[in-house]
Structures are given as structure tokens and as C-alpha cells.
Amino acid sequence: MIWQFDLILLTLVVIFALISLRVKDLMGASIVFGAYSFLMCLIWAGMGAVDVAFTEAAVGAGVSTVFMIATIYNTGRMIKPRPQDMSFKLLMMLVVVITGAFLLTAVNDFPEWGDPYSPVNDHVAAYYLTHSMSDTAVPNVVTSVLADYRSFDTMFETAVVFVALIGIYGIIRRRRKQDDSDSDTDALPPYDPSESLIIRQASRMMVPFMQIFALYVVAHGHHSPGGGFQGGVILGASLILYSMSYNLPTLFKKMTEKWIILLSAIGVLIFSGVGVICMMLGSNFLDYSVLSQILPATDSVMARSHAMLIVEIGVAFTVMCAMVGIYTSLASNGRFDKGL
Amino acid sequence: MLQELIASYNYIIVVVIMMIGLWAMLAKQNLIKKCIGMAIFQTGIILFYISMGAKKGSTLPILEHAHDGAHHAVVAAHYANPLTQILMLTAIVVGVATLGVALTLAQKVYQQNRSYHEDKILEKLSK
Amino acid sequence: MSTQAPVLMIIAPLIASIFITLIGWFRPKFSHPIAVISLLISSIASIQVFQMVLSNGPQQYFLGNWPAPFGIEYVIDHLNSLLLVTISVVATLVALYAKRSVEKELPDKLANYYTLFVLLVTGLLGISITGDAFNLYVLLEIAALTSYALIAFAKGRSLMATFNYVMMGSIGACFYLLGVGYLFIKTGTLNMTNLSQILVSLHMSQAVLVGFVLIILGMWVKMAFFPVHGWLSNAYTYAPTASTCLIAPLMTKVSVYVMIRVMTSVFSTEYVFNHLSWHLVVVAMASVAILVGSMMALSQRDLKKCMTYLVVAEIGYMVGGAWLGNPAGMTGATYHIIADAAMTACLFMAVGCIIYKHGHTSLDTMKGIFRKMPLTMLGFVVGMLSMIGVPPTCGFFSKWYLISGAIEAGQWHFMLALLFSSLVNAIIFFRIIEIGFFGSLGSETPDPHEHQDVAVKEAPLSMVLPMLVVAGALIGIGIYTSDIISLVIQPLISATF
């Protein structure tokens, strides 16, 4: 937290946000948005939120940008200027300015920035910091709160990703040859990167390292930044990279559509299954401590620690499959045969 | 003085970013730009939560621990706030899920109407 | 096992959704039975919880066994216990109803559809039961994402309507999250009970005021309250039949519930009505909402679209009643959540039956519909009578409490708006009777073949029966009004006012 850096970064973030909305080329806008996300995660890392910064680097700067590019690839990328209704824009501008001014009236009422004894930092959060070790034996407090104290949120967060995958799949899926009447005749030619040897070879070398790193992130989330989400996104990104440097059919040879959907469901099943087992052992839903009855050589504290790992693996499964699934849906425009 | 400016500068920037996003969602005509606006709005909120959980002179919320099992007494003020971080991890993931759905819809709408321009699409639909 | 009932009602549909995906990939026809069974479990659990609340007072459930402000807590009191029963029972009936309609409209997406269907119910139940402000946000997003997909499955015009819904829905959810952030920065907690304890000493804080306004605004966007109601009509009209039947009755009601929950449980009536003095402005907005909704409904030539505008008007009822600032208004608003969920479900199910047999719902082509589909129209008539407010249907009693609340508060315009809305509903009703019984409007020459093709062509029994059950419930709720008020709503009102 060097304030000079913060000052520069915060200003730059605003500029990048404005640029990505101004650019007339949608591809350019997506790239600038990726840069915006990356600056954002630098700010967060500076404020001590490494886990969030990690996730944003993988999700915001990485996968989101790829989603946008995949969308644009199948459609048009240039915005044709059209006469605009200025009165509507002015009205919206007024709404936004009033809302913003209203939000700013409360800024003076906030506790001082960075105060370690403000209500946010002192009340519930302080309990987590002082009790995480004795309650759960997990030194990374972010992981222990994520996967234990507030694990119910995390379970539904996993469910949100699952919902998005199933929803997107249902909206965009086309049965081959049947719906081709409304297809995109003027779409770009099928993507063929076979010319670019360098990209292929470089990606091929990157993918295994990414996957090993992702496994480390999932497994070591108790002691270092990371966990199921980050690991899952990186795993997903490695598969996306693989499919971008070759093409979709190559990816589907390794991992078919069926496995994407089924594995993502299994991930949620692992998470909620752990909760149900806790219920069957006579305690409340997701109370991991009772798992010591069935896990060998654990007391109730270590049972929490181990259960968190199981749960994180479930999260990683779902997130990986959802990222790959959403990407393939968008890139192939629902046909799952060819595409970016 | 400068420190104080930084303190509120943080929150002012949060509001500015959120309002840029909101404006794009409401006033932009291009569907993809609306999606970008939505993502910007969400990152603004995340920045807000992370800002309120920051502590001066603190380190990452990973506790020092000895491998022999002895627990040091933990002083909460030495570590950044973990709670805001968890909330925002959730918000990021929710955000990317919503973005995915929005982009999918935009792509399908483009296929039907050959345009990302809202007015043009509405003209076509009302025919 | 009854102590686990609160979580069981949420978990049963969640786990069912996983198995629908897993089994449905290989055998799509198993999706529907799994969905129905899980929703039945949910209904039974919710009724059990309801009985527990009635006999022992509010219940708590700690997820992961962590004590309240540190873990996530479920709180079931009088306000949400009845809502939980309503949601799960209506969802079960809609699931039974959906079978034929989904098979006809979306034959190749059964598994995906029912996965999202049960997850939407999970989301709605979770929003209603949770006692944690952030958990509510996550479930709000689950409910939102599933409903986007369920609407967009219809393809065609629904896609653009859904895109607008996504934008408005995200704005609503973002406002809610931001509002929670403004409260969180002053209090440091997300648990609603704990929040309300700390907020008592923070009534003068500007940040708390902004937080409150943002949460309420977010919920208004979500429930399509007057100035931001534009997205609702198209999204609901172009959705698949079964989606409309599930989303239209429940989604907006749950948003209204969240608004009332925040007003009464997180904040207090003292703060909302005495400290802030603009609640009467909201009532005026509600009057406008009722007028706009009714006028728009009157001008439609399509029955389904007409019904979606009635939903907008009904939102005005509940928001206005909740903000009147007196016990009668609040009673009317909470009672109307239940009554309106049943009424809207009944009407949209009837409309769905017509779509199933008739293909579309343009008013001009409904000649002889009463003779063609007598049972469907019986349900429709009961629903419409309840909308108008004819005793003994439940619509009468909610209107009674709302109007007496309006008189008590001296808000004559709200009372007039309610009466106007009843009048409009009556006009719509008689217009449909006129077309359906006596042929088309105007002096068109009578069709000579008219009497030959009026053979009864009723929708399948699996669709008509659930609708008639809901229609019966409208009268049932009306008859048991005094019990509902004295057992469920009265304890709530006396606790908040």
C-alpha cells in the first residue's frame, strides 16, 4: 500500500474503463477491458486481498476477456455509427449523475480508510482471524471462511456457475443440421491456426505447466493464496488455451461435451454431498466436524480441514467445466463442431 | 492532508467507476458495450468492499503458524480483512456467470437481427 | 429429522437438479418425475416448518453449526413461514402442470429445463428463508440466472426481452449488494438480526440512509415497480408457458418479501416511517404504478400480455400497502403476497392451457372459448373474480385490508387507485366473457360454422387439474382469511408496530 501507486492506479483504472467504452472496435474494447481488470487486480493485491486479485486475474482479465472475444468472433466486431437520440442519453446522464451524487454524500460518514479498528475490521472479521487456527487448523483465513464458516454461500456460488453453464448450454445449443436455417452465413471462416507454429508449440508447452500449477493451487489453498475457484479457472483456462491454439475438435477429443456437463454436476454433488453426509451423521448441514467419525485418524478440527479440501476439489471440477463449457458454447456458436 | 485525500479518493473513484458502468448499461446502444458496462459496475462494487476491508500496515490474511502445533496469539489488526475478500470472491464468480449469460444472449440476438445495435434490433422486431 | 427440515427444503431441489442433469443426459424422460419428487419433499418440509413456527414461535437453523453472526443462519418466523409453504406448493403444482407443456414446447431440452426449474425454486426458497444479507444476494443471483435462462429457452423474441431483463436484473442485484456494503461498512456484520441490533444506534448516519435507499431501489428494479417496470411485460409474455407460470407468481412476490423484510426486520418501522418522512411519496408512486399497470393492461389485445401488466399493477398494491405506515396496510401487503401468488399462478396456468390448445392468446380469436375449454375457463373466471375482489375469494380480503389501511392513513388517491384497478379488472373480465361467450366484439357477421366446431377440446388433465387446485385454493385462502390473519400475520404486525 504505497499511496503514490494507488493514486496512479486508481486514476488509470477510470481512464481504461472510459476507453473500453469509447473504442469503436469491439475486439479492441474487450482487450482494453482485460487491461482494466488487470489494473484492478493490482490495486486489490496492494490492499492485501491476494485471493481476490488472483481470482480477478484469472477470471476478469483472463476468462471474461476470452468470452467476449469468442462472442465477437462469431458476430461482427465494428460498430457502425448511427444517429443517436441525444435526449435519451442526457436523461440517462442525469439519472447517473444524481445516483452518483447521492452515493457520494455518504463518503464523509465512512470510517477512515485503512483503519484497523473500523466496524468492518473489528467485529466479525476479527473473530475469524483469531479463531481460524484453533477452530479449523487452516492458516489461510480466506480459505477457512470461504469453505467452512460461510461454506453455504460458497456452495451456492458453485451452483451459480453450474446454472450459468446449463442455462447457456440450453439457450445456445443447436442440433446439428436442424437449425442451420438461421445460421450465420457471413460469419468469419473457420479458425485455422495451423500456420502459426510458434503459437502451437508454445501453448503445447504451457498447458501441462498450467495444469500442474492449478492442481497446486487447489491442493495448497489451505496454506497459500488460492483454492478451488482459482485452481478451477486456471484448469479451465489451460483447456481453453489448448483449444484456441489447435481447434475445438481437438479439445473435444480429450474432453467431450458430455463430460463437461456431467463433471460440472458432479462438482456440485461433491460439495452438497459432503453437507448431506454431515446431516446423516447427526449434525447440521455442512458441519464438517462430525466427519471425524468416518475420516480415519482425525479429530473434529482436522476433519474440518480435510473436508475443506474435498469441498474445494468439488468447486474446482464445476468451475473448470463451466469455464470450458461456456467458452465452447460461445466460440462454436452452439454447434460444438467448429469455431474459434 | 494528502493521506486524507487518498482516503476519500479511494471511495470517490469507486463511485465514479460504478457510475461509468451504470451509464454504459443504461445509455449505450451496443449490446456488447452494455455487457462491458455491467462488468465495470461489478468491479466497482468489488473495489468498494476491498477498500473497506483494507488495513494500514497489515499483511495477507494468512496466519503465521509453527509446524509443531504451537499457536501464536493472533493480533487481528496485523492481517487484512478476510471477510470482505470472501464476499468478493463470490461476487466475481457470480459476475462472470452473469456476463456469460449476457454474452450468449447478445450472440443469439445478433444472429437473429444481424446487429448489436439496440434501436436497430427493436425496429426489426416491431416490423 | 424435523430439526433438519429448514435446510432439507432447500437442499432437496438442489440435489435433484444435479441428478436431473446426470440422469437426464441419458434418459431425459426421468427429469420430470425427479423434479416433482424433490418439490414434494420440499413442500412437506416447508409445511412441517410452518407447523413448528405456529406452535413454538420463530425457528433458527445454523448452517455448519457456527453461531449466528459468524456463520450463516436461517431464521423462520411468521412472515416467511407461510411464504415458504406458498412457494413450494405453487412450484409443485406448476411442475405437475409443466409436463405436457414443456414436452410440446421444448422437446429436446427436458433435462436442462427441469434442472433450472428446480434450481429456481431453490433460489426462491433460499431468499425467503435466509437470515444473512449476503447469502440473500447469492440466492438472488441463482434465482435471477435461472429465470433468465428459463425465459430465453423460448428463442425468438424472448431473447431480446431477456437481454433487457438481464441488464435490469443485474442493476437491481448490484444496487442491493452495494446497499448491503453501505450497511456493512458501518456495522461490520451481515447477519440480519445482528444488523438490526447495531443499526438502532446508527439512525442518524448518512451511510445507513444511503444503504437503505439502495437496497429498496434494487428491490424495486427486481420487482418491476413503476418507473422501472418496462422489462417485465416482454420477458414474461415471450417466455415458455411453464416458465411464466413459475416466474410470474413467485419472482416478484419474493422481491416484495425482501423489501418488507428489510423494512421491518433489518430496519424498524420506527426508522422507516418516523425517522424518514417520505413514505407517503412511495404510496403516491404505488398509486401511479397501479394506474399505469391497469391502463396498459386495458389497451392490450393479447391475453397473456394483458396479464403481465396486471402483475405490474399488483406490485403497486403490495408496495403501497407496505409503505402506508399502519398495521392495516402492512397486513394487507403481507396477505396479498400469498393471495397474489395464488391468483397470478391460477391466471397464467389458465392462459397456458389456452396456449396449449389454441396456439396463441390474441383476444380476437377467442370466440367460443368457454364452450371449447369449459374447465380452463372455470379456473380463469375464479382467478379473475379474485383479481376484481369478489368475496369469498382471497382477492377481496387483501383489497379490504389495503383500502382500510389507505383510509386510516388518509391516502385517498391510493384507495381510488385500488378501486380503479378493480374496475379495470372487471372490464377486462367482461370483455373476455363477451368474446368467449357471445362471439367477437362489434357487428361481425356470425360464422355459420360456429356451432359445429364448438366440441369440447380441453387441455390435458395434467394441466387442468393443478390449475383447478390453485383456483380452489383461492377460495380456500379467502375462507380461512381470519385464521391466517390471526395466527400468522397478527404476531408479525404486533412485533413490528
Image: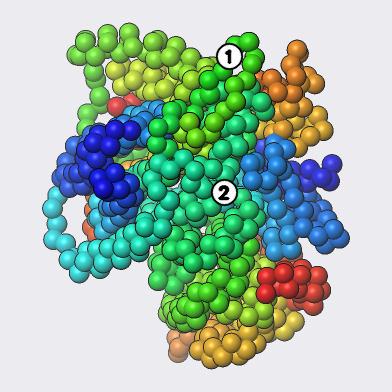
Question: At x 47% / y 50%, what residue is drawn?
Answer: C185
Image x and y of residue C481, in percent: 77, 76
**Left or right for C35, reference B51:** right
Q: Are marks 2 and 1 in contact (CB under 8 Å)?
A: no
**Left or right for C439, reference A334:** right
Image x and y of residue C159, in percent: 39, 52
Which residue type carries mark 1? Answer: Ala
| Inter-mark Cα distance, 2 to 1 | 31 Å
Residue C479 in view: no
Residue lying furthest front: B1
Q: Which mark is residue A25?
A: none
Residue A115 in view: yes
Q: Assign a secondary structure to mark 2.
A: loop
- Of the 4 image quadrants, the one containing the N terminus of chain A is top left
Tell me if residue A31 comes above or below residue C279 in the rendering.
above
Give the residue at mark 1: B66
Give the residue at mark 2: C189
Q: Viewer-proximal residue, A54 or C461? A: A54
Q: Viewer-proximal residue, C52 or A97? A: A97
Q: Nearer the viewer, mark 2 or mark 1?
A: 1
**Left or right for C93, reference C148:** right
The answer as to whether the residues below labels 2 and 1 share one chain is no
Give me the chain letter of mark 2: C
